[in-house]
Amino acid sequence: MSSMQSNSSANVTFVRPATFFINGFSNVPHVKYYYMFLSLVYVVTVLGNSFIMCIIYLARRLHTAKYIAVFHLALSDLCGSSALIPKVMDTFLFGHQVVSYEACLANMFFVYHFMNMQSLTLLALAYDRLVAICFPLRYHAIVTKPAMFMIIGVMWIFSVTYFSVLVGLVNRLSFCGSNVIDSHFCDQGLIYKLACNDNSINIMMGKISFGLLMCTPLILIIISYFCIALALLKIAHGADRIKAMKTCTSHLMLVAIGYLPLISNNIAALTTSIDPNTRIINNSLRQVIPSMLNPIIYTLKTEEVMQSIKELYKRSKVNTTQERRMKCSWKK
């Protein structure tokens, strides 16, 4: 009997599909208009984040540790959207829903990696605000440019290593049944469900990802703002307190836009069964809207950025006037 069992287990073949089929929405009329809306969001995202990165690069007053992190957030937003939306456009607007196994895993890695970098960068900015308000006299000694570069470097090493392992674990799964992914991209959770062998390690890693990469940064941000609130209560003058609070408003808005949809989507997925079409809309908007809004919020709500834009505009206007005068003098 035992020999029969061993023979049957030996006959089980490991199946790695050559391709996956990205299914997307099912039975939704005029769905192409939604994908066109996502392409418009992508254009705004590229323009907005490129603009904020150019302003930070050109304005010397923004060459500080804080704006290194802001620059990195804009870069992560730009790369994250570029990893997702152009591929979604190609998949559904041009009918390339069949994706090779290797391309699917690469897409999964880059989408999740840059989503994680956005989250960790918000945590780095919370650390910046914590030191600035709780230890104002030591701020420039603690939050230096080398220190911020080191923090970002550690973030990259951690994220690349973690998601290399996470994506690499997909290679241990056998897909002997369906290869259809009911999502708009190569979603790890849905790929795990297609496996016909033991996927318990992959599911466990998915749960660890939710706790470690989503909940932990948010908890640390909440703790940092609790400490900031205590420090603000100790400020005697109301005007100084309001001035200190204003330096946090843009970051708090980014945290709310980035985390509230993320947490609510995951809680809804754990507590109720969500329609696949609803899940695709929720996930796609949660992935792209914050990246579009982040540069707009930092431009409009941060006084230093607005002042830098005005200075750069005046400088360019002066340079243009001088060039015109020089051309006129040459003609004479």
Image (cartoon, rainbow, N blue to C red):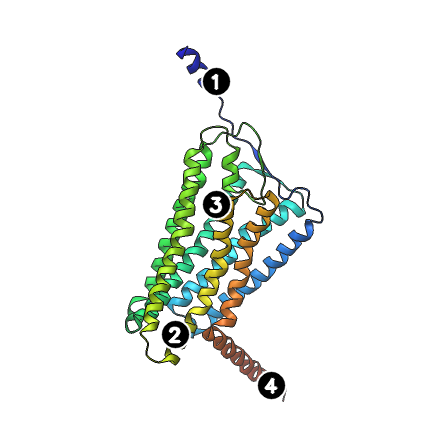
**Label 3 CA crowd tier, 10 Å (few <14, some 14–19, many 20+):** many
Q: Which residue is mark 3?
A: 109
Closer to the N terminus: mark 3 or mark 4?
A: 3
Residue 191 on image: x %, y %? 52, 37
Mark number, residue 11: 1
At label 2, the amino acid type is Ala
Nearest to the eye among marks 4 and 1: give it: 1
Q: Residues within 10 Å of mark 4 (few under 14, many from 20)?
A: few
| Residue at numbered disc 4 | 330
Category of crowding for the residue at label 1, using alpha-carbon neighbours closer than 10 angstroms: few (below 14), some (14–19), many (at least 20): few
Residue 315 location in percent, x, y?
Answer: 51, 80
**The N terminus - image quarter:** top left
Instruction: Name the element at disc 3.
Output: helix
The label shown at residue 244 is: 2
Residue type, label 3: Phe
SS for dot 4: helix
Question: Alpha-carbon distance for marks 2 and 1?
Answer: 68 Å
Between circles 2 and 1, the one closer to the viewer is: 2
Query: Which residue reaches farthest right?
Result: 30
Mark 4 or mark 2, whichever is nearer to me: 2
Q: Are marks 4 and 1 in contact (CB under 8 Å)?
A: no
Q: Are marks 3 and 2 in contact (CB under 8 Å)?
A: no
Q: Are marks 1 and 3 in contact (CB under 8 Å)?
A: no
Seen at 50% across and 31% down, the residue is: 195
Q: CA distance from mark 3 to mark 4?
A: 57 Å
